[in-house]
Image (tube, helix red, strand yellow):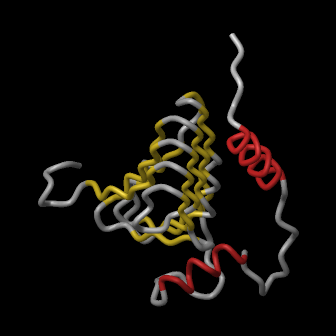
């Protein structure tokens, strides 16, 4: 079975694929990743110091609801800095689950084209983008990434008032 993606979706997929294929140059000992630095600056006060260690969540890509999702299910006793590599959703539904209550999540970016993307975030977790967000003909109230003709939402889970864990 074959199908044709709309031109906008093809262009965005090609651009995203090119950006995902690039690698970050080696950093000097006294430098930190610019994306991590942007998140730390966005938070202002944080528990990580000047050269924090961090984990990285893999890239997730879904087209028409088919593909790999991304999530962090580890629960740590101390604050944990987690860099979330790009999440791409085209013409379908997708979730990114960031469920560590002590997680400080630094999103590289999300790209959502003609679909619904939900970021499920633990109640006490922190979240920031390493770059600005934008919305074209869609709903992205918290400006988490790029949304074109779709909806991107952040849903807090595990909060005492909602009864979920």
Is 11 situated left or right of 87 in this image? Answer: right
Instruction: Tell me which residue sits at (32%, 56%) in the image.
Output: 155
Observer-nearest of 1 and 155: 1
- Outermost top residue: 1
* Position above or below: 125 against 33: above
Describe residue 164's horizontal placement relative to residue 80 as left or right: left
Going by the picture, which residue comes out furthest to the right? 25
Given residues 72 and 110, the one toward you in this image is 110
Relative side of 11 to 113, left or right: right
Residue lying at 61% horizontally and 46% vertically, measured from the top left: 88
Q: Position of residue 104 (x, y in %)?
A: 46, 69
The quadrant holding residue 125 is bottom left
Residue 98 position, x and y percent, is 43, 54
Residue 41, quarter of the rendered image: bottom right
The spot of residue 151 in percent (x, y) is: 44, 51
Q: Residue at x 39, y 56 (%)?
A: 153
State how many labels appear.
0
Question: In which quadrant is the N terminus drawn?
Answer: top right
Q: Is residue 69 left or right of residue 27?
A: left
Residue 127 x %, y %: 45, 69
Image: 158 above or below 80? above
Of residues 72 and 10, the one nearer the viewer is 10
Report which quarter residue 9 is drawn in. Answer: top right
């Amino acid at each position: 079975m074959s199908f044709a993606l709309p031109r906008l979706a093809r262009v965005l997929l090609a651009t995203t694929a090119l950006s995902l294929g690039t690698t970050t140059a080696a950093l000097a000992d006294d430098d930190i990743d610019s994306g991590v630095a942007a998140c730390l600056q966005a938070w202002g006060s944080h528990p990580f110091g000047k050269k924090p260690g961090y984990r990285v969540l893999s890239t997730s890509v879904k087209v028409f609801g088919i593909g790999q999702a991304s999530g962090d299910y580890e629960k740590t006793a101390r604050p944990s800095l987690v860099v979330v590599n790009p999440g791409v959703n085209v013409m379908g539904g997708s979730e990114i689950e960031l469920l560590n209550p002590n997680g400080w999540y630094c999103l590289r970016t999300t790209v959502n084209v003609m679909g619904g993307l939900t970021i499920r975030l633990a109640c006490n977790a922190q979240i920031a983008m390493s770059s600005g967000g934008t919305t074209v003909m869609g709903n992205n109230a918290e400006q988490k990434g790029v949304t074109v003709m779709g909806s991107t939402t952040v849903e807090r889970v595990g909060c005492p008032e909602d009864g979920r864990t």
